[in-house]
Structures are given as structure tokens and as C-alpha cells.
Image (spheres, helix red, strand yellow):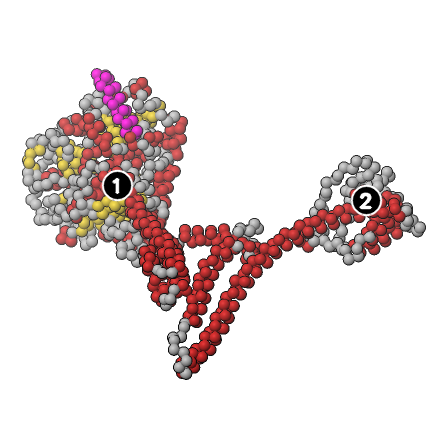
Amino acid sequence: MSKSNEEEEDSLPPNQNTKPSSSSSSSQRPPLLTKSKTLTELRTTTAAAAASAAGPGGAETNPLFSTVRRIKTLPTSASYVYPSFLGAYPNRTRVHHVKPRSANPDCPTVDGDVKSAASPENSSRDSDSETGKFLVSSGSQASLVSQLGGRRTRGFNHSLILYLLSFTCILSVPYAAYLQNRVAKFQEEKSNLCCLCVDNHIFNGSTPHFGNANIRTVALYTVVFTIFMPFMFYKYLDRLPPIKRLSKSTKINKEEVPLKKRVAYMVDVCFSIYPYAKLLALFFATIFLIGFGGLALYAVSESSFTEALWLAWTFVADSGNHADRVGTGPRIVSVSISSGGMLIFAMMLGLISDAISEKMDSLRKGKSEVIERDHILILGWSDKLGSLLKQLAIANKSIGGGVIVVLAERDKEEMEIDIGKLEFDFMGTSVICRSGSPLILADLKKIFPPPYSQVSVSKARAIIVLASHENADQQSDARALRVVLSLTGVKEGLRGHVVVEMSDIDNEPLVKLVGGDLIETVVAHDVIGRLMIKCALQPGLAQIWEDILGFENAEFYIKRWPELDGLRFKDVLISFPDAIPCGIKVAAEGGKIDINPDDGYELKEGDEVLVIAEDDDTYAPDHLPEVRKGLFPKIADPPKYPEKILFCGWRRDIDDMIMVLEAFLAPGSQLWMFNEVPEKEREKKLTDGGLDVSRLENIKLVHREGNAVIRRHLDNLPLETFDSILILADESLEDSVVQADSRSLATLLLIRDIQSKRLPHKDTKSTTLRLSGFCHSSWIREMQQASDKSIIISEILDSRTRNLVSVSRISDYVLSNELVSMALAMVAEDKQINRVLEELFAEEGNEMCIKPAEFYLFDQEELCFYDIMIRGRQRQEIVIGYRTANAECAIINPPQKSEPRKWAIDDAFVVISSGE
């Protein structure tokens, strides 16, 4: 091959030096380099490979020698080194370049398929292709290194400028100190010369303060440098290489955040977390302005440094004090200080205004703490709150009023407006509203200050937890449980008891398990359900319970009377002129309350007496009055007869009501259930509630499906044959008080209208059986017949519906929310009363009922109330009140019990009797 051809071949690009092989075999990838090699080493390796492939005498004809010659033309000093910043070579995936298409089909690309052949000619072409690939990789890596080098060069130029600026600024400070030292030496020499001149009477003037002027100049430079240096530093903060390298060394984020943003973020966090950060920043800004402003005034005026600081403070405090400054420098400095002072005072006024507004807003929204003692705390908000506040205010009337604190998740203004709409006088009781969640311990601490404060949590007399409007199984009772858990968080100072309103009796044990002995529960649905059944079986009992539970008339009280120790209960019964004893709290049995005990029980030390009285301070024992037993008719209680009862609606605890009816009714009774729940779903719900229908012995369930507010559905029922009809607040509407009451009233009016049209065909057999024992009592007969119709008991949730029910001439009614509120208030005043209510509401044990006067006296017999009480004891009953035939309501705990009067056979007595 000629030299010209060799040069021409050398001038071609590497991807055109390799010629295609017609006899090439299967494609094969070239082997990876095992280490970095320089070009000098590559020459030796390539020559040896060519010699071995060509054999003797074939070196000149082997195409690999052209590649060797081309490699030899490279400078000896040039070397190829794999870049270290790309990682270890053997572990890196090989880069595959895009194969450019060649116009000549006989000229393949560099990264084309390399065919393996057995002939030496094919081997030489393979080696040439491998060398071409190596040169292409070297060129691309060299371009990458050059780009990185260019970036580093630009970064180095910026860093060099910053270094020069920083070095100049730093060098100026010691240089200024050096010049000041020189000036001081010159001043000292001049002072010595002046002293010599004065001694020789040559100099007659005063010595100038040249050194003081230099100090002022240094002060001026210091102020200027201090003011402008932070701005320059912050502007070029991200360009400082040491800080950037330090930030890159952290392994928090791979993508570096600019330092200025981080500084701004830290300042923002500081102002957000620490409430006094703004005030401290303003204070330090004021100190900085006074200090450097005074230093600047000292530099441009003839005042001393302390005088300059004072002037700076006056400029900051009063922006008009700089008007008498003389000279350009003092005026510029004084205006700057006054401007900064105006800005600082504007910020100060803004902070003060924001603090006052925030405090006023906190007071308006009820976010402040409550510091009270012997108060009652109500947690939550419901429709029962109005009645509850009324009963608590009446209970506190005897002590001149008290304090009630309400904590609910509502706005304070809204709560105060709703409480202000209540139509009754609080009689000296203060109601304090606070906005917050009882589930959050921080909100509870607003009412429960810590033990080291003025008033601790132990000062709360009682805590009432109201049930929410949500479903009992899902949210209402679960929320009550969480509130109890929150209260246990401050239990170290909790001395008062906690009254929890529950919605489902099945959840009661869990709440008591969490709260322990401090928890008293009132299951609203269970109380109302039992009371509705008792009122259905004994008309007029709802009004009696309203008088007993409310604080407006007589209620239960428990108190210790040492002077009664040693007396038997039959004597204790007539020892209180203004109260009626009902039971004994036995100290020997751990405080057990025994209602209606035996006459022979003798009071011992520590025993307390349970009475019904108007208030806790209105009764006291007195001497025993003279009573006479006399002869009276001994009539046994009439036997029970089967009854027919209708339930309109579906309650969550309807299974519990069925069990109560099973205990009260006689065998052969029927319970009709009329609601929109499908029959199969009813059976499933009753079974899930724990009721086994197959084990019911006294009652038989009759299912009817329909809507109680649709007349044609009600027409299919034999409404004239039922002894009692209970209109229940339907489970689907119990969250809406207005809708539930509207539905109950509509059902009531429809049933009344249907009964009035069917009156001539009414079957009076069941009514005759029920009236067999009460045929002489006109009041009971009137309540049972209810204008010749069945007894209808409506569950009313809103107390405002009471007047509407009265207009509708209903026979009897129940105010659900009001009765529950009364029970909650009574238990809050005295937790022991909860044991009394539980026993009186139970299907076994003592119960409150109404008995006719013919059980205790003859017609027109003249007796005092003590005589009737003694006669009632012979029937194991405690007579607590009466109602005359012409009276509108019963009288509980009548006054003047020792005065005799004539009784009619149509009168009735309210008694507490033991269960049969």
C-alpha cells in the first residue's frame, strides 16, 4: 500500500475505516475493558495481536496495521483514563450509540454487527472495528469532561470575585486600625511638641482634638460597613462555596435547597412557633437602631457617645426632635433614625392591636380559662340542655344560685343566644359557655386548671356528659366513652362524680369499666321505654314522675340524722312533718339503699334516711304524732288480665321494652308491632338485641307492616280493640326532634279520628277487665277510658310540644327529653339517687304506682295523712301522696299531715309498693 493511500486512509473517520466482510459469521459483542489503559499500552497490545493474527510475513497485508499506524501518530503523552466521577467501569452499563446509516451499503457503521470468522482477514477487521469503537467512546467522554471543566471554571470565576471582595472588606478593618495607631503616635509626638512650645511660651492656642476626629471617622466607617455588609452577605449567600459544600455534605435531600430560602423558612417557623418572637425581634431592632444610630451621630457631630445615644433614643421615640439639627451629616443621620423609629413604632402598634384583637376574639369565642369552685360542668350540647339548666337552676335556688359551665363544640355567641331564648329565670345561677371539644384534653384544661393554679379540677362538684344526636351504636355512646377517657386524663384532681347519658343500655358496662366508681350512667332510651310502659299500664303515672324527678316540687334526698338512731322504721316514717321517709341507706352493708324496708328495722349509727321533701333544708325530724289504725277494708290487689297493646314505630331498644312487658303482663296478652321495618328484618334485630321470641310466655307478638302517618294503613288495624297504644319516636327520625314530634302528633290525631268513627263498635270487654279493681275511682276511670278511647302514650322529644299534646286531649303523655334532663340533674346533685331510680324503674323490686282509696278507707271517712300512711304499712306500702277526685294533679308529700280530713271513695293514692 502506498504512502498516499495510507494518509488518505488515515484521514477518514474511524467509522469508515472498517470494511464489510462477506464471509462474516454470527455476530459477537467485543469484550469489555477490564481496566483503564493509556494509548501507549494500547499500541503494544494491538501490535502483538496483529502479529499473532498475520503470521510470518503477513504484517504488511493485515488491515490491523493501518490502525496501529494511526494510533502511533497520536502524541506519546496523550493517554486515555476512565473518568473517576462516572463510577467503576466494570459495574457500569455499556452505552450504546445510535447507529448512523451509511449511504454506501458496502461501508457499515462503526457499531454495526461484527461478524466472527475463522479466517485471519475477518479477525483483522474485527480488531479494526474494536479500535474504532474505543476512539468514539474516548471522544464523547472527552467532550463531557470539557463541559464539566467549563462549568467549574465559571464557578471558580464567581468564587474568585467573592473571595476578592471579602478579602478587601476584611483587610480594610485592620488597615484602618493600623492607620489609627499611626495617627495616635503622631498625636502623641505633636502633644509633646505642644508641651515644649507651651513651656517655651511659643504656642498660645489650645490643643486640637485631632485624635477624636479620627475615632469618629472609624465609627462612621463601622456603621456603614455594618449596615451594608448583611445585605451583601444575604444577596450572595448562595454563591459562597464553603457554605454550599457544607450544605451538600448533608444527606437530607439530594436536591439542594437554596440557603436563602432555608433562612427565610427558619425565620418563618420561628415567628410561627414562638409567640413572643415578633416582640423580641422588635426589641432587638430598637436596640440596634439606637446603638448604631447613636454611633452614627457620634461620628458626624461633636457630641459625646452617651449624648449621641440619648439623642438617638429621642429621635426614635419622637420623630419631630430632629428638626433642630444643623449640618448635612447630622440631618441625614437624624432623619434616618427618625424614619426607623416611625417604622418600629408602627410595627409596635400593629403588634399591640393584634394582641388586643386576638384576646377579645378569644373572649368572644370562649377560648379563655374558667376559674370557679363548686360548679357543675356540662360537656356537650343537645336538646335536653334547656330543661337540664332549668332543673339545676331550681336546685341551686336555696343557696342563692350557683355556677354552671357548658363546654360544647359550638360558637360561644350561638350558645349564649340559644340559652337566652329559654323562657325561664335562672334565679341567681350563672351560666358560663366555652367553645371547645370535650375530647381534647387542652380544651378540658380551660375548665380544669392545673393543680398549681388557683382552682383545680377537684373543685368541680359534678360533671354531666350529654349524649350527641348520632346513632348510639356507632357514634353517640362511643363519643361518651372517649369523653370519659379524656376525663380520666385529669383524674388526679377529679373529686366530683361524672354523670354520663347513654343511648344504649348494652354500652353501659363498658363506660363504667373505664370510669370506675366516679361514673354514674343514665340510659335515656331505657328510662323512657320503661316509663312509657308503666304509664300505659297505670294512667297518670307520667305526671307523678314529673313531680318526683323535677326540683320544682318534692324530690328524693338522703341525709344522716343521729337523733333517730335506735328507732324502728315504722316510727321513723311519721317522724318528719315536712317529708316522707322511703328507705334507709344501711352503713353496715356498704351504703346499700333499702327502699321500703321492714317496719322492725332499727336505725344504727351511720345509717342515713331516704326521704321525699321539697328541699334539703326544709325538713327535720320532730316528736312522734298520735295516730290511730282503725278498721279499714282489706281488699287484695285484683288479678292481672290479658291485655292487648299496640306499638306504633320502631325504637332501638324495643327488645328491652318487650322484656319489660313480659314481666308486667299476664299470660295471654298480645303485643302488636306496627312499623315500616320488614318482618324478617325485625326478627333479626330482635335476635341481635338478645331477645329470644320463642321463650316469651306471657305475650304473643303480632307483626303488621305499614306507615303510621298514612290513614289507609291505620284503617287496617283494629284500633278500637287495644287497651293501650304507644306511639314511639321512630328510630329513623330520632335525630330530628321536630320531625319525630310531628310524626307522633300526626299519628295521634289519625288514631283518635279513626277511633271516634268506630266508637259504636268498640269492644268494651278488655276495658271492663282492667277496671275491675278500680271501678269506684272516677279519675282512674277517666284516664283509662280517655273519652271512650284506648289509652294513648306518645313519646314527645321536645318540651315545647307539650301544649300541642294538651290541646289534642291526649289521655297521657311522656316528655322524653324533659324527664331525662330531670333524672340527670337529680343524679348530678346526688349520685346516690341513681340507685333509687334504677330500682324504681326496674321490672322487679319496688315500684311507684297508683292505688284507689277503697284499699285504705271507707267513703267519707275522716282521717289524717299519718293514719293513711300507717294503714299503707299493713299492705307493705309507703303512701307518698294523693289526688282527690276533682283535682287536676296529684299532691306529693302533702303538708299538714296531722290534720284530719274527709276522704272520698273516688280519691286515689300514690304509693311505693314492693313487687309481686
Residue 343 appears anywhere in the view: yes
Which residue is nearer to you in this view: 418 or 297?
A: 297
The reply to whether the magenta stretch includes residue 82 is no
Magenta stretch: dominant secondary structure = helix
Q: Nearer the viewer, residue 389 or 180?
A: 180
Secondary element at image label 1:
helix
**Picture quadrant where residue 524 is located:** top left
- Magenta residues span 739-761
Mark sitting on residue 905: none
Within the image, what quadrant is residue 888 found in? top left
Q: Residue visible at 82% across and 39% down?
A: 107
Residue 746 colored in magenta in the image = yes
Identify residue type, mark 1: Glu
Q: Quadrant of the C terminus?
A: top left
With 620 as the anchor, is 344 left or right in this view?
Answer: right
**Nearer the observer, 593 or 27:** 27
Please give the name of the residue rendered at 45% of the width and 66% of the height, measured from the top-left corner: 218
Q: Mark 2 falls on what kind of element?
A: loop
**Place of residue 444 in the rendered image (x, y in percent of width and height, measured from the top left):** 32, 49
Query: Farthest right residue?
Result: 57
Q: Which residue is mark 1?
A: 416
Tell me which label, 2 or 1, sits earlier in the chain: 2
Q: What amino acid is at disc 2?
A: Leu
Query: In the image, residue 105 lies at what x, y percent?
Result: 81, 35
**Residue 558 in the image, given as x and y percentages of width and height:** 19, 47
Residue 246 visible, this orientation: no
- The residue sitting at 55% across, 51% down in the picture is 256
**How many badges with numbers are in the image?**
2
Q: Residue at x 82, y 41 (%)?
A: 115
The circle on residue 12 is 2
Q: Note whether 285 is above or below 509 in the view shown.
A: below
